[in-house]
Amino acid sequence: MRINIKKIISRILIVLGISIIGINYYTIYKVEKENKNIVLQYEKSINSGKKMQEVIKLNEDIVGILKIPKINLEVAVKEGTDKETLKYAVGHFEQTAMPGEDGNFSVAGHRAYTTNKFFSNLDKLEIGDELNMLYMDTTHSYKVNSIEVVEPDEVEVVDSMDKDKKEITLVTCTPKFSGTHRLVVKGTYVQ
């Protein structure tokens, strides 16, 4: 009986390939499920009639919910931009304004398929598109007024250009899967 090494290796490679694809799909499913749970928990706590102090205590590190109708995005925004925060949500840059406040409310998110892909379609936004941020019990609306690609070390994009102006900045890596630059989408507050 002859053992066909080529057949064995090809079958091992097929199983390995299917496993990698399966793990990737499971990761995406898990991230999206966790995000939906966070969004539902936040919205439920706001709609429960509880005082805002209780809502904040219940949701600890959740700033609010970012909704971008054009790309069908509804994602939790958590405080911070560390790896763990960005695993199941997008992150609010500490030291930047909160939604609806004067200054620049700045958020970072991934667009890779290996972790999450919340900002994967951010490049489809155009000037004038709507960005909505549910914060506490109020939805703050912004309109996209600027889209640019910058170097990763150009961190001043999250700074406030006008402290008396309400702005939002969304930052993600670009191009997809390499991240050599940053895609920056800015919006101004709509009354």
Image: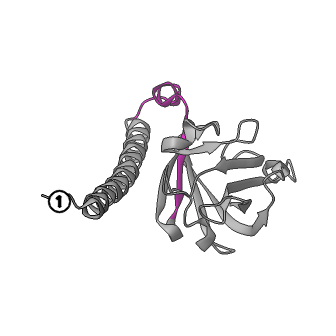
Between 165 and 174, which is closer to the camera in this rendering? 174
Expressed as whole percent of the image width and height from the top left, the position of residue 47 reads 39, 41
Quarter of the image where the C terminus is located: bottom right
Q: Residue at x 75, y 53 (%)?
A: 166
Q: Residue at x 39, y 48 (%)?
A: 27
- At a point 71% along the width and 36% down the height, the residue shown is 94
Q: Is residue 191 in view from this perspective?
A: no
The answer to which of 172 and 36 lies nearer the viewer is 172
Q: Position of residue 6 (x, y in %)?
A: 30, 63
Q: Is residue 167 visible?
A: yes
Q: Amino acid at mark 1?
A: Arg
Where 92 sits versus 68, above or below? Answer: above
Residue 159: x %, y % from top left: 83, 48
Q: Is 53 part of what is drawn in magenta?
A: yes
The secondary structure type at the circle numbered 1 is loop
Give the residue pinned by disc 1.
2
Image x and y of residue 135, in percent: 56, 44
Q: Quadrant of the N terminus?
A: bottom left
Q: Residue, x 36% and y 50% (percent of image)?
A: 23
Report the magenta residues as a range.
49-68
User: Looking at this view, is 128 or 12 the one in front?
Assistant: 12
Work out whether residue 182 or residue 79 is closer to the camera in this orientation and state it.
182
Tell whether position 140 is magenta. no
The picture quadrant where one finds residue 37 is top left
